[in-house]
Image: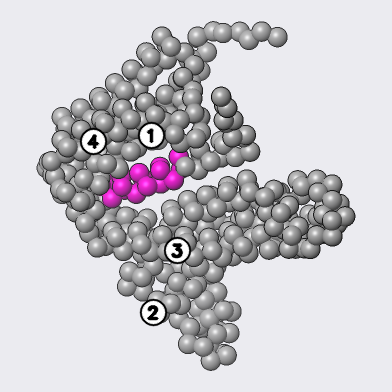
Amino acid sequence: MSFSWMAWTLPTALFWVGIVSCLISMCVWEYYSPGGNPRVGILRFETTRGDRLFISLLGSAFIHLAWLGLVGPGLWWALGISFVYAICVFKTV
Amino acid sequence: MEKTYNNKAWLLVIPVFLLVAISAIIPIMTVINYSFQDTFGKNVFFWAGTEWFIDVLRSERFHDALGRNLLFSFIILCIEIPLGIAIALSMPKKGPWVPVCLVLMALPLLIPWNVVGTIWQIFGRGDIGLLGYTMSAIGIDYNYTNNVFDAWATIIIMDVWHWTSLVVLLCYAGLVSIPEAYYQAARIDGASKWSVFRFIQLPKMQGVLIIAFLLRFMDSFMIYTEPFVLTGGGPGNSTTFLSIDLVKQAIGQFDLGPAAAMSLIYQLIVLLVCYVFFTVMSNVGTDKPEEVEE
């Protein structure tokens, strides 16, 4: 069975490995600290760590798009900003 | 009764997981892969990096389609929400006419999208359509195929005809759930009809109105079939919404790379709105967290 139509490349494969690693890490975290750590943060509604990961990933996608649209290629800065953003989300949301 | 925990139950999730993998995860993986590459077919791909994303984000075509989509959503929300509330308020709350009204309201919702487009395409034609013929007969130069204003007006009226019922049914459900005691108290206080609406009915409909607003926004933002069948995106590109533009690019021009990049940007916008929708839905009616006073 050939999957050549999926057009895999190393960078896109690494991207998916990153996403899957995040999900596996969340599962491990949940195993050792069950319950999802729900709390009410600055958004004024209850979020679990799954919610916080989703907000981080979605926000990071928009940060990268904004960088591409306003600045141009070279996404290392966007990646750095996304990490800072994700840390802020996990600490405050 | 105590719950039984058995981790083997996770095996029951496998069929759903496989279904989602085939119908969603594999396609989205492929779209992401395509968005960074260029192809001329036969499974031969060339690395393009982030070029397609930059092209799409800076393209006038994308901005125009996005603008048209947002304008369309704004117009239909401005019409459908007040109209839906007004119709729901005027519907009987009890008696034999209730089921008649409910069925009449539900009818447009049961018609498939492509059939709605076809109905309005024929309805608006100047030679055989009731709307087009009547407009011509009273001296109005109406032609939705070559006049931008007519095309927009027809699409908006079509959407209002198709989807206002949803807002009506949601508002009606909110209205009938208000206990009679509220109205009795208002009568004792001598409240006017406007005061009853402003201070009883509207606050009690808040939850369903949020649902109606978000549902209609998402639906109208992803609209494809009805305008495609009615105008095909024309005249020119005047009714080419994001979804129509995407299909033109992917299937019409076979520009799979830019189309993949555009579809991902489009999907991210929809995902953001979905998340807001989900969050609002989950929190509607729940009490706000109490402030702890020291």
- Work out how far the residue at label 4 is from the one at label 3, CA to CA, in angstroms: 34 Å
Q: Chain of mark 2?
A: B
Q: Chain of mark 3?
A: B
- Identify the amino acid type marked 4: Ile
Q: How is the image coloured?
A: one colour
Few, some or many residues within 10 Å of mark 2 (<14, 14–19, 20+): few
Q: In x, y percent, where is residue B35?
A: 22, 43
State which quarter of the image contains the N terminus of chain B.
top right
What residue span does the magenta drawing correspond to? Answer: B260-275
Farthest-out residue, front: B294
Q: Is residue A35 above or below residue B284?
A: above
> Which residue does the numbered mark 4 point to in the structure image?
A81
> Callout 1: 10 Å neighbours few (<14), some, many (20+)?
many
Secondary structure beneath dot 4 equals helix
Q: Which residue is mark 3?
A: B72
B143 and B282: which is toward the camera: B282
Disc 1 from disc 3: Cα separation? 28 Å
Specify whether disc 2 shares its chain with disc 1: no
Look at the numbered discs 4 and 2 and tell me whether their residues touch, using CB distance below 8 Å. no
Q: Which residue is mark 2?
A: B146
Picture coordinates of residue B148, whole percent (x, y) = 40, 76
Residue to which mark 1 is pinned = A55
Element under label 1?
Answer: helix
The amino acid sitting under disc 1 is Ile
